[in-house]
Amino acid sequence: MSHGDQAFRAEKNTENWPEMTYAGALSFLRRRYSRDLNGVDLAISGIPYDAAVTYRSSCRLGPRAIRAASVQLTELDAFPQGFDPFAHLNMVDYGDCMLDPHHPETIPAAIHDHAAEIIRNGAKMLTFGGDHFVSYPLLKAHAEKYGPIALIQFDAHCDTWEDDGNSLDHGTMFARAANEGIIDVARSTQIGLRTYNHSDYGFEILTAPWVHRNGIDAALDIIKTRAGDAPVYISFDIDGLDPAFAPGTGTPVSGGLASWQALELMRGLNDLNLVGMDVVEVSPPYDHAEITALVAATVAYAFVAILAEKNGAKRNEIGRL
């Protein structure tokens, strides 16, 4: 069989073909497009929704951009682990959640049902937004299986401003999730915040300046001690990064995490009970040279590598790490 276009030509989910990096059918990490979840460990899915934003829009185009930015990540073994994650992780690109933007009242249920179908079949989810509101129905679906979730939230904003329980707003949904018991705030941590709210809602908050001053190891110690053995969901708002590293987002705030800090933090979460992750708020029209989409894809790839290691992939690290 000639190589190329494995996204739709591969017969097995674990295949990893050579591709022309600049050509071919796009899926995340060139994974096979499939909705057959039999034996699947991880399903990639996009939620192309951005009607809940409060400033700049267009993050509905985020899933497509993140997929496109992932092509180089499949050329070599995972860094820094030095293994092929796809040899140990049965992973598919499930495609995008079908939404009816002309009937916004249907959006939360559509996202929830989409996620619940994947989770019910035994796969974990790696989801690309879309705006940050999509995390609420995703968390709700996860909590139905795992119970209250320990949330690790990378973000410039707390997203716990006052919520009326009904609005579609990307700045209030974690208050709703906390009030409904979906999130176990006593085990949850927010990282990178640099905007103000008069209530912490019970979260541990590691602001961006705190991380800059105290470092990666100190942050990881707090995050992991707090989460313990609880089921952990990572919600990564790309505006948690400084706009110098992620300009392509709707609500940029100066002073955020650098891309290297975010990746070091992600790679340090490998011993937690990770049940799912989303990467949200990538807005391609505001991006430059695809650097926002690239860091989003790389952060997501860190999650993939963690799950592969949990499935038996062995590290083969070189150099001073």
Image: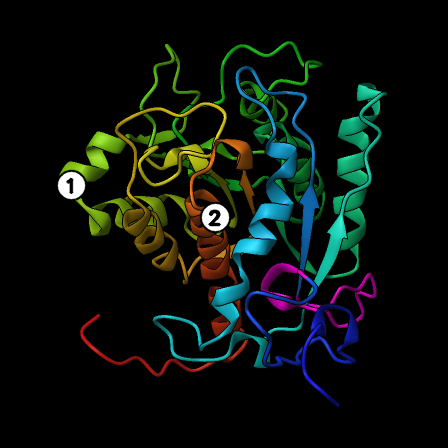
Which residue is at a point 73% across and 61% down the rendered structure image? 122
Give the alpha-carbon distance from disc 1 to disc 2, as whole Å.
24 Å
Label disc, if present, on residue 296 of the rendered structure: 2
* Residue 168 drawn at (x, y percent): 67, 18
Q: Which is the main secondary structure of the residues drawn in magenta?
A: loop
Which residue is at a point 59% across and 12% down the rendered structure image? 163
Kind of residue sitting beneath label 1? Asn
Q: How many marks?
A: 2
Kind of residue sitting beneath label 2? Ala
The N terminus sits in image quarter? bottom right
Which residue is disc 1 drawn over?
214
Task: Pick the residue in front: 232 or 283.
Answer: 283
Crowd tier of the residue under label 1, counting other residues whose Cα lies within 10 Å: few below 14, some 14–19, many 20 or above: few
Asked if the stretch drawn in magenta spans residue 51, the answer is no
Mark 1 or 2, closer to the camera = 2
Crowd tier of the residue under label 2, counting other residues whose Cα lies within 10 Å: few below 14, some 14–19, many 20 or above: many
* Residue 167 drawn at (x, y percent): 68, 14
Task: Pick the residue in front: 67 or 308.
Answer: 67
Q: Which range is magenta?
A: 26-41
**81 left or right of 249?**
left
Q: Is 124 situated above or below 167?
A: below
The C terminus sits in image quarter? bottom left
Which residue is at a point 37% across and 43% down the rendered structure image? 226
**51 left or right of 246?**
right
Do we see residue 239 in this rendering? yes
* Residue 130 drawn at (x, y percent): 63, 35
Label 1: element kind: helix
Marks 1/2 in contact by CB < 8 Å: the verdict is: no
Label disc, if present, on residue 256 of the rendered structure: none
Which residue is at a point 35% across and 32% down the rendered structure image? 243
